[in-house]
Image (spheres, rainbow, N blue to C red):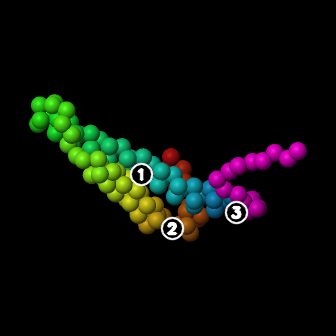
Amino acid sequence: LQAVMASDFAISQFRHLRKLLLVHGHWCYTRLTNMVLYYFYKNVTYVNLLFWYQFFCGFSGTSMTDYWILILFNLLFTSVPPIIYGVLDKDASAEILMELPQLYTMSL
């Protein structure tokens, strides 16, 4: 009986491990941290907007937006910016990250 292992990456030889950790690990770490910050600030902004709207309306419970506007807001501000950021942003090139491995530890 053979155990089945699951992982995010499959490498055929350990010589690829250095690039996987130093380059792709660094890029993944910076993208994830920026994504978490983006979602935090997006939600803080929306909740702040709701609070001030309710304060203006005397906490009457009226709805500020229609459902389709809320869906559009979440669709645009939750999917498009992280995709653009993930595709276009690389704080350092692969060659620099391979030459200077201490850059990986500086971001931690």
Disc assigned to residue 23: none
Indicate the position of residue 46 as horizontal and vertical percent values: 27, 44
| Label located before the other in sequence (2 or 1) | 1
Q: Mark 3 to mark 2: distance in Å?
A: 17 Å
Whether 4 is among the magenta residues is yes
Q: Mark 2 to mark 1: distance in Å?
A: 18 Å
What segment is highlighted magenta in the picture?
1-15
Residue found at x 46% / y 65% = 87
Residue found at x 40% / y 56% = 79
> Does residue 50 appear in the picture of this structure?
yes
Q: Residues within 10 Å of mark 3 (few under 14, many from 20)?
A: few
Determine whether, in the image, residue 6 is placed left or right of residue 104.
Answer: right
Q: Tell me the amino acid under the disc marked 1.
A: Asn
> Does residue 91 appear in the picture of this structure?
no
Q: Mark 3 sits on what residue? A: 16
Whether 42 is among the magenta residues is no
Residue with the most extreme top position = 59
Q: Mark 1 sits on what residue? A: 34
Element under disc 1: helix
Give the quarter of the figure containing the N terminus: top right
Indicate the position of residue 62 as horizontal and vertical percent values: 18, 36
Q: Tell me the amino acid under the disc marked 3.
A: His
Q: Mark 2 sits on what residue? A: 93
- State whether residue 51 is above or below residue 85: above
| Total labels drawn | 3
Indicate the position of residue 6 as horizontal and vertical percent values: 71, 49
Q: Residues within 10 Å of mark 1 (few under 14, many from 20)?
A: some
| Label located before the other in sequence (3 or 2) | 3
Determine whether, in the image, residue 102 is placed left or right of residue 46.
Answer: right
Indicate the position of residue 37 as horizontal and vertical percent values: 38, 47
